[in-house]
């Protein structure tokens, strides 16, 4: 393999570009690896040196020069993204959309019905099936849940939906460990769940038992991405839980470790610990939206993730409704996230006007209504993150998926960047983040007891049982 230095590496943004000379060019860091694959020449940028595997180096460099020009000028025709999650860790899904479905509101206990979902109540099994079907119809593979969502009842729902899909495609469930490993390799999607480091959990055994229980509820033998729900614990540092994940990986219980709500320093420490113990840290799930983009803490975290090849899963990408068409000034008055982030209605007006203007512009281009939510999601993708969206209806699901059909221009991204706020959850004091873990642990335990008492089953599931 021939090597040569590249003068383009320092300022090249990460992107997936559909180039006029190739089917697809993948750019993701500061190195270039060229691998011809039939008519598709793939460029993967990693870090310091440029590697070429092509007969004509001069043609390769010319192609790269044209690609750099397109990216720098903002005229690339592809999808800007963090590509390392799929390209490096899950190549089977490299063509999958950069979108994830969040299942926080998919729990089925009375707490989910009356507290988590408020007046809207719990999703019915039919509604959940239809939303899942719509996302899978567009080949979305990332589905995010947690043991804390309904005390594991959200995980159970995901397991039921996945099993029903497998049956419809006539996939046989595994009957032994070997078949289970093969099934994990041939899995048709990427279920993701989380370990909550509650104060009463402080050993590797606690971590493993929680993972085994989650895998059982999701009906998988190996969790593709198992998240640490928070780096906060009363006595354990993040490195300890990374070691727990490495132990479980050796046992075939997980493929990779994900982080959640981690700062730049916490991401750096976790990645280094992962290299030490032998487990890949592949993604950081964090609050990332136009409400917090101009926070120094968020930008520091983003830079660190890019440095270490950690993808960013952007939750609250729609600001829990603050960046959508449905919000009115009357609804804003009762919006709890706005109160928690100390956002006033005048703070949002310039940003919302810009979102609506851009949406109207693209509505004319694609000849259908484009929502503010679609603009906010594409803004996340333009910043190399994978938006994580929670949907409660088929209409919301369909609107979310329409965002995959068009893109923002570099000028539109810059306009929104300038108007973004700086209310970042990473700026919260440690005591508040630790208190969140304690309260989440109490709610998780209460939901689990409700489920054990038979109060956590969906109506359809209960009748089937």
Image (spheres, helix red, strand yellow):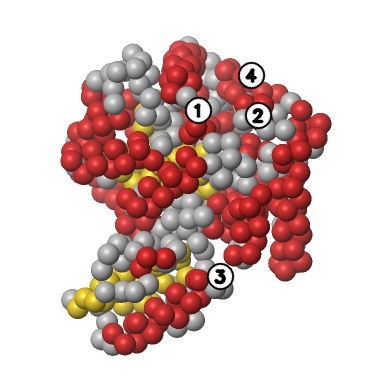
**In this rendering, the label closer to the viewer, 3 or 4:** 3
Residue that protrudes farthest toward the right in the picture: 330
| N-terminal-most mark, 1 or 3 | 3
Identify the residue shown where x is 63% and y is 52%: 418
The one of 95 and 360 positioned closer to us in this rendering: 360
Q: How far apart in space, not on screen, are marks 1 and 3 (Cα)?
A: 35 Å
Percent coordinates x, y for residue 429 in the rendering: 47, 24
The Cα–Cα distance between marks 4 and 1, rounded to whole angstroms, is 27 Å
Give whichever of discs 3 and 4 has the lower sequence position: 3
Circle on res. 74: 3
Q: Is residue 240 left or right of residue 419?
A: left
Percent of width and height locating residue 188: 40, 51
The residue positioned 72% from the left and 69% from the top of the image is 365
CB under 8 Å between discs 3 and 4: no
Which label belongs to residue 114? 4
Q: Whole-Å distance between the Cαs marked 4 and 2?
A: 25 Å
The answer to which quarter of the image holds residue 441 is: top left
Instruction: Examine the image and state in which quarter residue 46 appears.
Output: bottom left
| 169 up-or-down from 219: above or below | below
The residue to which callout 2 is attached is 342
Q: CA distance from mark 2 to mark 3?
A: 35 Å
Kindly state the secondary structure of the residue where label 3 is placed: loop
Residue at the spot of label 1: 428
Q: CA distance from mark 3 to mark 4?
A: 47 Å
């Amino acid at each position: 393999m021939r090597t040569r230095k590249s003068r383009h590496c320092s300022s090249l943004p990460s992107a997936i570009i559909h180039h006029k000379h190739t089917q697809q060019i993948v750019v993701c860091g500061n190195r270039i690896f060229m691998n011809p694959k039939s008519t598709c020449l793939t460029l993967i940028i990693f870090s310091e040196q440029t590697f070429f595997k092509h007969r004509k180096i001069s043609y390769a460099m010319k192609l790269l020069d044209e690609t750099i020009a397109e990216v720098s000028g903002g005229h690339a025709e592809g999808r800007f993204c963090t590509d390392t999650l799929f390209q490096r860790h899950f190549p089977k899904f490299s063509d999958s959309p950069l979108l994830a479905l969040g299942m926080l509101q998919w729990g089925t206990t009375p707490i989910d019905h009356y507290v988590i979902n408020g007046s809207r109540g719990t999703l019915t099994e039919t509604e959940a099936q239809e939303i899942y079907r719509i996302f899978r119809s567009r080949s979305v593979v990332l589905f995010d849940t947690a043991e804390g969502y309904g005390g594991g009842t959200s995980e159970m729902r995901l397991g039921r939906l996945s099993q029903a899909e497998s049956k419809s495609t006539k996939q046989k469930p595994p009957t032994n460990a070997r078949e289970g490993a093969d099934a994990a390799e041939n899995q048709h999607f990427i279920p993701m769940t989380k370990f909550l480091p509650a104060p009463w959990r402080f050993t590797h055994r606690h971590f493993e038992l929680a993972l085994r229980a989650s895998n059982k509820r999701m009906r998988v033998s190996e969790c593709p991405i198992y998240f640490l729900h928070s780096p906060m614990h009363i006595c354990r540092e993040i490195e300890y839980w990374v070691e727990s994940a490495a132990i479980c990986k050796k046992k075939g219980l997980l493929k990779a470790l994900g982080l959640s709500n981690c700062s730049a320093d916490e991401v750096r420490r976790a990645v280094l610990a992962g290299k030490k113990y032998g487990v890949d840290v592949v993604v950081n799930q964090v609050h990332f939206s136009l409400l917090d983009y101009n926070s120094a803490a968020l930008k520091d975290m983003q830079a660190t993730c890019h440095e270490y090849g950690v993808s960013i899963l952007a939750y609250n990408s729609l600001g829990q409704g603050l960046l959508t068409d449905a919000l009115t000034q009357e609804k804003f008055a009762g919006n709890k996230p706005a109160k928690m982030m100390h956002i006033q209605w005048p703070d949002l007006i310039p940003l919302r006007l810009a979102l609506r203007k851009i949406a109207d512009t693209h509505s004319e281009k694609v000849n259908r209504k484009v929502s503010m939510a679609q603009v906010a999601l594409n803004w996340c993708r333009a910043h190399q993150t994978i938006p994580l969206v929670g949907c409660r209806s088929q209409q919301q699901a369909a609107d979310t998926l329409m965002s995959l059909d068009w893109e923002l221009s570099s000028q539109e991204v810059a306009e929104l960047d300038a108007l973004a706020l700086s209310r970042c959850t990473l700026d919260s004091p440690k005591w508040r983040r630790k208190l969140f873990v304690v309260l989440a642990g109490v709610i998780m335990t209460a939901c689990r007891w409700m489920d054990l008492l038979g109060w956590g089953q969906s109506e359809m599931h209960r009748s089937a049982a």
